[in-house]
Image (spheres, rainbow, N blue to C red):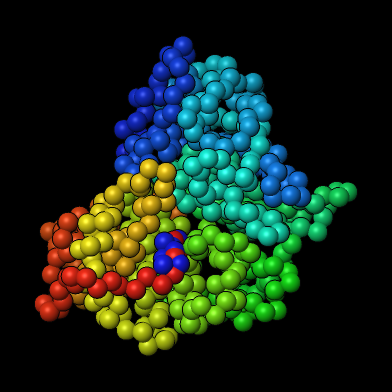
Amino acid sequence: MRFRISRHRKAALLASAVCVCLVAAAAPAEPLGVGDRLYPYLGNPGYDVASYDLSLTYPGANDKPLEAVTTIDAWTTARLERLNLDFGHGTVRSVEVDGRPAGFARAGEDLVVTPEHPLNRGDWTRITVRHTSDPVPGKDQQGGWVRTTDGLAMANQADAAHLVFPCNDHPSDKAMFTFRVSVPNGYTAVANGLSAGAERIGRTTTWTYRTRHPMATELAQVSIGRSAVARREGPHGLPLRDVVPAADRKALEPWLAKTPDQLAWMEKKVGRYPFETYGVLMAQASTGFELETQTLSLFEKRLFTEPAYPTWYIESIMVHELSHQWFGDSVTPRSWSDVWLNEGHATWYEALYAEETAKRPMEARMKAAYGASDRWREAGGPPARPKPPAPGQKIDIFRPNIYDGAALVLYALRQEIGRPAFERLERIWVRENRDATATTADFVRLASTVAGRDLGGFLEPWLYGEKTPPMPGHPDWKPAATARAATPHTRR
């Protein structure tokens, strides 16, 4: 995710919370969580989602609820007399577990489901929820559906997929997705993954998409609008598809045509693109950020049409979201405290691309970041231990400390172990953790292995210290007393 100033396995978490799910049937429904330090009620213990099948029916107006059916296939990891789903916005019509009616109640932003019979550990179970999905946000709610001038898109990071559909809304529980989106004829629906066809019946067309790789709920994307889909090939014949307002397709084409070369550049840095397709979604909406939804990154259209930013900078933001497909989407943080692994790397490749293609020196950017780093740490916490979001501001973790502050950590690491070892580390990291989740400790261990020595003592203060350590190779770099590093655009 990249803000325009720029905001742009699960075993331990599940085990730590699973005991609270073994409750007596008579106990009152209560919200649960998997113990995330920043979002304590996100996710739920006792099961591991394998797949989501999400059916949505768009009524033709983006201020009216969509009718929806969410089907979840999961393995139970504990005996459950009831189970919790994250679902905080919409009306629940009915719930079934394994084809039989189940009881349900709301508790905070959880939907608590009581099956007819308890589920045993190791069971394969199917939960079907018939519900509405409301694009008009509730009080103090952020994210989920984004209303565009001609329809809808999604922006679910970090704590908002459950405002759209019932789910286990935590990045530690990745799953496969199928989307079936029914829209009035004349609208186009596009979602993560590859198209599995479009069926027109009367005045409605149902578009189906499936992912080929597991995905975190916060990366789900559905675009509904009067859109054009531009298709082309990327490296190795990779199918690319971009979604733009139909009336703007010709004007936006020069920007869309940049993606194949940007993909080739990223592949030279870190290896083969990890998914089945890629593209950009240029939405007619005011979000204040861009977002790396898996295989279809979300951008505000006006970023490309208003003369507010130079070409080189817009291209670097495109690379920021593209690099997230490796760092954050394919290799997903196991907890939200590990989000620096997403944003630090995306900021790193954003800056490296600007250096190599537009002569914007990385060293100058990192020196400016070093000058601001102590203030960023004080305001937002160190990169690997960000402060919790402020009340009512769930996306408040996306602060400079996890963007340029985290990229500064990577710069220090490259200074310490040398460019060849650093570049080898990056390629191994995305290869060994593809389609999985990973932690800060995993990164430190791999860095130590690649470097051939224990880097824990070096990286600990960079990742967790209240003050910024001295920069290897730059003893003259000092924290700045008052100067501010430039933060020109918001990205996630």
**29 in relation to 266, above or below:** above
| Residue located at (70% from left, 74% from top) | 249
Is 298 left or right of 159, judged from the image as shown? Answer: right
Image quarter where the N terminus lies is bottom left
**371 in relation to 466, above or below:** below
Is 359 left or right of 87, judged from the image as shown? Answer: left
Q: Where is residue 474 in the image (x, y as percent from the top left)?
A: 15, 78
Query: Can you tell which quarter of the image residue 348 is in?
Result: bottom left
| Residue located at (69% from left, 67% from top) | 245
Is 20 left or right of 116, judged from the image as shown? Answer: left
Is 397 left or right of 482, judged from the image as shown? Answer: right
Task: Confirm whether residue 439 shows in the render.
Answer: no
Outermost residue on the top side: it is: 26
Query: Can you tell which quarter of the image residue 391 is in?
Result: top left
Q: Position of residue 216 (x, y in %)?
A: 48, 49
**How many marks are shown on the rendered structure?**
0
Image quarter where the C terminus lies is bottom left
| Residue located at (70% from left, 39% from top) | 67
